[in-house]
Every structure is written in structure tokens, then in C-alpha cells.
Amino acid sequence: MKKLLGILSILSLATISASTTISCGLKGNENNGHIDDNENVNDIGNGEDTDSGSGIDDNDDDDTDNGEDNENIEDGEDTEDNENTEDGEDIEDNENTEDGEDTDNENTNDGADDFEKAVEDFQDKGSESLLNGDSEATWIDAGDLGYEVNDYYKMFELYNKQIRVAKLDDFYSSDEFKNIIQDLKGDFFSDFTNVSIDLSNMNLVGEEVLAKYQPQNLPDVFFKNTEANVLETKHAVLREIHEDGSDITFKSGVQKVNNQIFDYLDQNISQMYNDFETNFSQKLQGKDYRGNYAKIDNFLMGEATLGGIKITTDKFITTINDFKINYIFSLSGEELLPSTNLVNSYLGEAIYKNIIAGISSFQSNLGVEAPKITTSYEIPLAFSGINQQTGLDLWQDIKDNAFYSVVSSNGDECWTYSNDNYPKLGSILSLTISGANESRQELLKIGYQGNYSLELCSFDSSGTFIFRENLAIKFSTIFVENGLEKSGWEVPNDQNPYEYAGLQIQFNFMNIAFGFEEFSNNANAIGKYFMNNTRI
């Protein structure tokens, strides 16, 4: 541990310049982060110490100047009987003087160790005191961030890192938050005089998510169209979402729902609740939480790192760049029970509405619609691939990123994705390919999502989900007699050791894999369009 030494023990406030900074053994500028939805946690704030860091002697030495045994010899002058003379001045009783200032015959750093300890306690225990004190600086509900009751579902946009960082930055810049931090002064620096905490340069250095409501890692499978709700759920997600089903009485009122999406979420909310409560409780136990908010409708917990916090006393100055503070987001503050479902809680209602918004945004962004090709089988997905706002053309990206392309003797244009590069298709459809970020962020923001992906998958003969295993697919543009084109992805059976092709789609609270029996590893799969370009 670094210590505050030397010159500080004999300086008064009047002799410390405004630029002097005392590091007090701080841990330094650390950025910790976590990626969620292709996010880079540490892309915010520079966490730089605005002071020079001068004024500290980092050595564990005594307060002496080129001397031993409390004797100081300067300019060739000798001292005897433990007396030191300088410019004709006499010092007695083991006293050492420099520039006319006196100190006792003790090896002291004038309270620097105490200040360093206070700063460390402020860093290590400040956040814990806010957490256990149920402070609004840590426990943040919808009203604190300006969300109305009918807009609770929009609060899940905080799963999007860009939006979460912006919201946190505004929150930590507010006078309300700064006043709470100022109030910690009395808890940790009461033994010092003229203490001030300057937050004018405080910034958000980094943040990471520790726990949140989310679906399981393995998707729910919707495979055989003959099974209940399978075909209807495929159409709701991969065609057009409608809310023209049952009338449901939510906490905020009665409204019609999409029965398939409602049923899917109603079957999964208990699992999401249990998983979150287990993880969240462990995090609180690790911090010895003793407050009253553990059982309210919290849905996301994280930790932020703040920098640029300057603490000044009459003798010392330090700037903290790694102050850790938890943030916990909730909706209404109502208590949740293990029997929580979509209709007896604001959280359940918000989760349903959030998924409807996410699916709608996906369909609008990719131009999802009914296929333009008339076939005897169910084409899994049809979309224009054009984003009018950003100019993105997904079908052009499909062509440009193919493993190879050929033009057959009859004029067919074919672009093939093999096992080596088929994951690129997932990047294109998930809008994570280079040049697609603007379209992706538009989809996330309009749908209040932090997670979206659409990727190819496969199934074995029993309909068991297999992610990205031995897939190959061919994109074709076929010129027919009347001069029109039919474009889409075909499944060339000779390259596919899997049994059935599928699509996996994910949002904040949905993870589904759709299997398609028509696209099986047999001859009748050849020439069938897996996806259709509806612009042609």
C-alpha cells in the first residue's frame, strides 16, 4: 500500500498548491465491463485523473531530509548533541527544522494514513451503505427514469447497452444523485476538517450487468406444424404479428393479445423469475444486504464505475477514478411472489408488451411479409431486406458474402454458403455484419430491445435442436420464362448431413427455434426456397 509521507507532514493548507493531488494508495483507473448484445462496456468515459498526482513520496521512509538518526546536515554545517542549526537558529530536544517549521520528535505523516484509510473505506463501503440503506442512488424504479405506468415495457430498453449507459450517465449527473454522494461525507470523513467532495468532473467510466430476467440458453422448439400452436406461432413471429386474440385483464387494464406469444411467455415467466431470483439473491447475499427491496419487481442488477470524484480536506487532495456502485432497476416497486405471472404483476404485463414491440420492430426493419412465390410448401421466411431509413440491402449482403457464386448454363445465378462460411448468414440476418449497425440499433430502439438475433440451425430426425451443425445452403436467382426472377435460399440435400433445417430467433425474453419438416435431408428438399426475396 502506498503511503502519504515526507513533505506532507510538515505542510499546512496554505502551502499546498491547488494542483497537488494525493493518490492515497488508490487502486487506479480500472475499466471493467461486460458485453451484452454485442456491446463493449468500456467504450465510455476516459476515467482520467484530472490532477497531476504530485505531492506524494511513494517510499516508506522517515520524515528526514538526507540525514540519519534524526540529524540533518545542510551546507557543511555540523550538529552536536542532537541539535541541528541552520542560519544561526538553534534547535533543541531532538527537533528537526526546515525552512523555519517545527515538528515533534516523532516519525509522523501528519494524518496521511488516516486520510488514506478514510478514502479506502469510502470506496469499499460507500456503495454497500447505499445498497443496504435502500438508497435511491442504487435502487432505481421506473419513475426515477421518467417511465409512466403504461410505458413500463419500454424500460426494458435498458437491456440495450447504448441506452443503459446514456440513462445511467444522466442519472449520475443529476443533483439528486450528487447530493446523496455528498451525504456520505459525514460517514467517512468526520475526523477531518474542511472536507469537500467535488463531483463536477465525475464521469461514468464503465459498467457491467450482473443479473437480469432473460430466457434460458437453449431455445424452446416449435417443430411439427401439426402440433398445437406451432404453425400459428411461426406465422406470428416470421410473418406478421397481430393482437386479435383473447381479452386479457392486465394490471393496467383489459386488452386483446396475441394468443401464441401470450401462451409462450406465460409458460416461461416462472422459469425467468426463478432464475433471476436465484442469481439476484446470491449477489445480495454476497454484499450482506439487509434492506427491504429484495422482493420487489426488480429485473436488472449491475455495477457501475465512477471516476473524477475529488475529495479535499485542509491538508490533502485525492481524485478517485474507480468508485464502484450498484444499480438495480425495478418497475413499480410492488412485491413479487413465486406465483408471479403475466396478469398479476406489472412485470409480467411489461414482458408481454415488450416482446410484441420487439417482434413488430424486427418485421418492420427487415421488411418481413408473406412470400411472393406460390408453392405447395410453407416457405419459412420472406422479406424484402431493404431498410428505407438506412439504405441497408440484406439480399445484396447475402450475395456479396457468399462462399462462391456461379452462373449455370441455363442462366441461373447461384451463391452458395458452405460449412466454412454459413455463420455469415446469421451475422447478416442479425444485423451484426459490418455496415449494418445503424439498422440494428434502429431495430433495438424501436422495439425496446437489448437482444436480437436470427440464425440458421438444424434438427435431428427426432426434432431435437442442433445449433449450427453441418449446414450448407444455396442462394439462387432463377430466371423464368416470363422474365421474372424467383430468389431465395435453397437447401441442397447432398451437402446436408442434418435431418431438418431451422431458424433460431431471440429477443429480450424470447428464445425460439423453428424447425421446418419440408426442408429435410432427402431429395424433395432440393429446389425448395427456404427464404424468399419479396422484392422480386
Image (cartoon, rainbow, N blue to C red):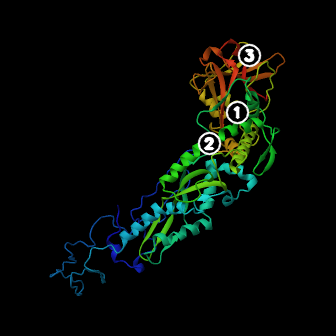
Which residue is label 3 attached to?
411
Residue 394 is tagged as 1
Badge 3: how crowded within 10 Å, few (<14), some, or many (20+)?
few
Q: Nearer the viewer, residue 254 or 467?
A: 254
The picture quadrant where one finds residue 204 is: bottom right
Q: Position of residue 143 (x, y in %)?
A: 69, 59
| Residue at image point 74% right, 30% down | 229
SS at circle 1: helix
Q: Is residue 404 left or right of residue 84?
A: right
Residue 159 shows in this picture: yes
Near-viewer residue (357 or 272) = 272
- Residue 61 spot, x, y in % from top left: 27, 67
Mark 3 in CB contact with mark 2 (< 8 angstroms): no
Are circles 3 and 1 on residues that touch, CB within 8 Å? no
Residue sitting at the far left: 80
Is residue 430 in view from this perspective? no
Q: Separation of disc 3 and disc 2 at Cα?
A: 52 Å
Q: In terms of sequence position, does the residue under pointer 3 or pointer 1 come before the other?
A: 1
Q: Position of residue 532 (x, y in %)?
A: 75, 26
Above-or-below relation of 468 to 361: above
Q: Secondary structure at mark 2?
A: helix
The numbered dot on residue 96 is none
Q: Quadrant of the N terminus?
A: bottom left
Dot 1, how many residues are within 10 Å of its Cα: few (below 14), some (14-19), or many (20+)?
A: many
Disc 3/disc 1 C-alpha distance (Å): 23 Å
The amino acid type of the residue labelled 2 equals Met
Query: Residue 308: where, in percent of width, then height?
Result: 51, 63
- How many residues crowd around disc 2 within 10 Å: few (fewer than 14), some, or many (20 or more)? some
- Give the position of the C terminus as an image quadrant: top right
| Amino acid type shown at disc 3 | Gly
Residue 272: which numbered mark, if any?
2
